[in-house]
Amino acid sequence: MEREVVQQAYLQQIGSRRTGKRWVIELIKKLWHFAWDLWEHRNGILHKQNNISLEAKKTTTKEKARKLYYKASLTLAQTNMAYLLFTPLTQLLTRLLAYLEAWIAQTSQAIKVQLQMDRRRRRIIHQMRECLRGWLIAWCYNNNNS
């Protein structure tokens, strides 16, 4: 109320027809509009930033899925984990982000396990070959010297 009186005195001093009450009403409106604009600006930045971050994450996840699908097709195609490749890549990439992330996690683990099993099989086969080679060398040596 004090501001209205002070403004009214100023307006009368300069010869204006406006009133102090009207000036206070307009000032309050401006302050409300300013607060509203700040709030909208904040929300726009917050949600736009979230959308930009989400889109970047989707793009990164889709690229990771694309590369992993190729690797999985080389590693898992003839295994009991081949069901991870039943969904075509083009269809897989249209799934929700959470689905893609779960698929990536499961497929990555399946590839890791399969590669470990492959290394173990190769090591066992190598050991068997070495054992057979040693036996054949000994057998040949014994048969040639008899």
Image (tube, helix red, strand yellow):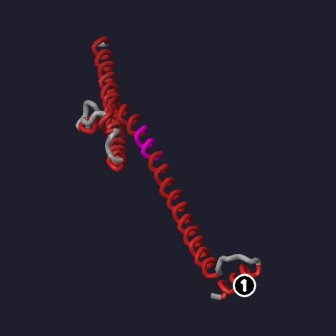
In the picture as drawn, the residue positioned furthest to the right comes out as 13
Residue indicated by mark 1: 9
- Label 1: few (<14), some or many (≥20) within 10 Å? some
Q: Position of residue 8 (x, y in %)?
A: 69, 83
In the depicted structure, whether residue 53 falls above or below residue 107: below
Q: Please report the bounds of the magenta region as a residue range.
A: 56-63
Which quadrant of the structure image shows residue 146? top left
* Three-letter code, disc 1: Ala
* Residue 68 located left or right of residue 19: left
At 38% from the left and 39% from the top, the residue drawn is 65
In this view of the protein, which residue sits in the foreground, 50 or 17? Answer: 17
In this view of the protein, which residue sits in the foreground, 131 or 116? Answer: 116
* Residue 105 located left or right of residue 23: left
Q: Position of residue 50 (x, y in %)?
A: 48, 54
Q: Is residue 54 magenta?
A: no
Q: Position of residue 108 (x, y in %)?
A: 36, 42
Q: How many numbered marks does the figure carry?
A: 1
Q: Is residue 59 magenta?
A: yes
Which quadrant of the structure image shows residue 26? bottom right
At 25% from the left and 30% from the top, the residue drawn is 78
In the depicted structure, whether residue 51 falls above or below residue 128: below
Q: Position of residue 120 (x, y in %)?
A: 33, 36
Kindly report the secondary structure that dominates the magenta region of the rendered protein: helix
Which quadrant is home to the N terminus? bottom right
Q: Secondary structure at mark 1?
A: helix
